[in-house]
Amino acid sequence: MADEVVLLDLYVSMYGMRVRLALAEKGVKYEYKEEDLRTKSQLLLQMNPVHKKIPVLIHNGKPICESLIIVQYIDEVWKDKAPLLPSDPYQRAQARFWADFIDKKLYDAGKKICTTKGEEQEAGKKEFIEILKVLEGELGDKPYFMGERFGFLDIALITFYSWFHAYETLGNFSIEAECPKLISWAKRCMQKESVSKSLADPKKVYEFLVVMYGL
Amino acid sequence: MADEVVLLDYWLSPFGMRLRIALALKGIKYEHKEEDLTNKSPLLLESNPVHKKIPVLIHNGKPVCESVVALQYIDEVWNDTAPLLPSDPYLRSQARFWVDFVDKKINGYVKALWTAKGEELEAVKKDLLDCIKLLEGELGDKPFFGVETIGLVDVALLPYASWFSVYEKFGNLSLEAACPKFTAWLKRCFQMESVSESLPAAEKLYDYVVQMKKKLGTE
């Protein structure tokens, strides 16, 4: 019996993109449903009653919520192709640690850049760049975060790359100037079809933010 | 060669308590190092340079930080006994989801319980009870959140639960009346030595709270 996979998502969401990316890496066919966050569908409210947020993966009728949890689920179910997490427990712990770091820090710093001005925005920019520099340090000279192969931690971070144009425009700064190694890594990732297909168009992200924040 | 396991910890930390419980459940021998959080050790700063926080699990010299990451690491390395996660991917995703829920919601409300006053405190108590009721729904008629035995969600939640019993003593949060299933689960878990020996004694927590409330003027 064929798998039925549905993704409740928002085109510009970097969290949703993570799931799209994981599904693309694994070659999983799925039905994409775009949500309007101002009028959430009955299906979304039913499938994620606790947080009422996207993304939600619905696999044969059963919902999985929270992007990194979904990515790990995808990795465990479709385990015969493109492993996303390393097999060594210590390396897995490192990947999870850094993904948690990204989730704790990056979105809020980026939001500051988009929604504030003056000194507060400068502080947001500084914080944002500091976070990226720490991640650059973790990347080192490796092609991808966990080594030779694109995986879980790359997925966790690369989707934010589609928001960089918006951050740079609204913050009037260049991320590449500050973090050239990281941008180099991002461009390397973008050469993968699964990545370029799954990431939102940066211009559309910018337009979305302008509308959302009334800029 | 024997495993060398060190835990950098702080007696009061619910995150540290999680790891103590997991290590006890798995019967793992380890060296417990209590940190003075006002004067962090060079080992802590070296092992967790990013967050500089406890707990840190150091296994054969290699540090693992963030309690939920460390719990999964412990489960994957010492995988021959007391599994914390089931083998089914869907059930694993659900366990991870509820642990994330505990981290996102319960942690914040518990902190606020000690510092909020008046109307704000009533709002916090209501939000906390709502969260516990949601968890009760997830528990259902099972003895534990884990499939047949104590699992990741139980371990993640228990440290906070030991705090609730202290708060009940103050007479301000009637958990047993509002959430009988949760209270029953708590008592059931405390019957396990791995749990009761890993958590601070209720009296010690109680004394700590009395002192803290005096300091904050929220008696």
Image (cartoon, coloured by chain):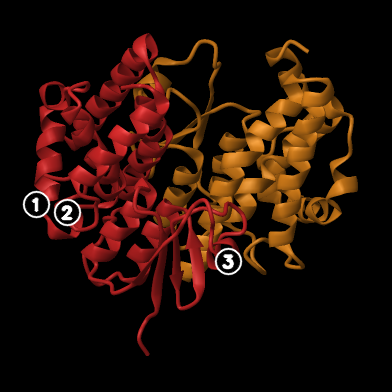
Say which colour chain B has.
Answer: red
Say which colour chain A has.
Answer: orange
Q: Specify which label sits upstream in the sequence, 1 or 2.
A: 1
- Give the position of the N terminus of chain B as an image quadrant: bottom left
Residue that carries the numbered disc 2 in the rendered image: B196
Q: Secondary structure at mark 1?
A: loop
Q: Nearer the viewer, residue B100 or B196?
A: B196
B7 over B29 or under it: above or below: above
Q: Does the rendering let one see residue A105? A: yes
Q: Specify which label sits upstream in the sequence, 1 or 3.
A: 3
Residue B161 percent across, percent down from the top left: 24, 39
Horizontal arrangement in the rendering, residue B84 relative to residue A117 (left or right): left
- Of labels 1 and 3, the one closer to you: 3
Q: Nearer the viewer, residue A193 or B79?
A: B79
Circles 1 and 2: CB distance less than 8 Å? yes
Residue that carries the numbered disc 1 in the rendered image: B191
- Of labels 2 and 3, the one closer to you: 3
Image-quadrant location for residue B47: bottom right
Q: Secondary structure at mark 3?
A: helix
Q: Specify which label sits upstream in the sequence, 2 or 3.
A: 3
- Give the position of the C terminus of chain B as an image quadrant: top left
Residue B35, numbered circle: none
Q: Does the rendering let one see residue B141? A: no
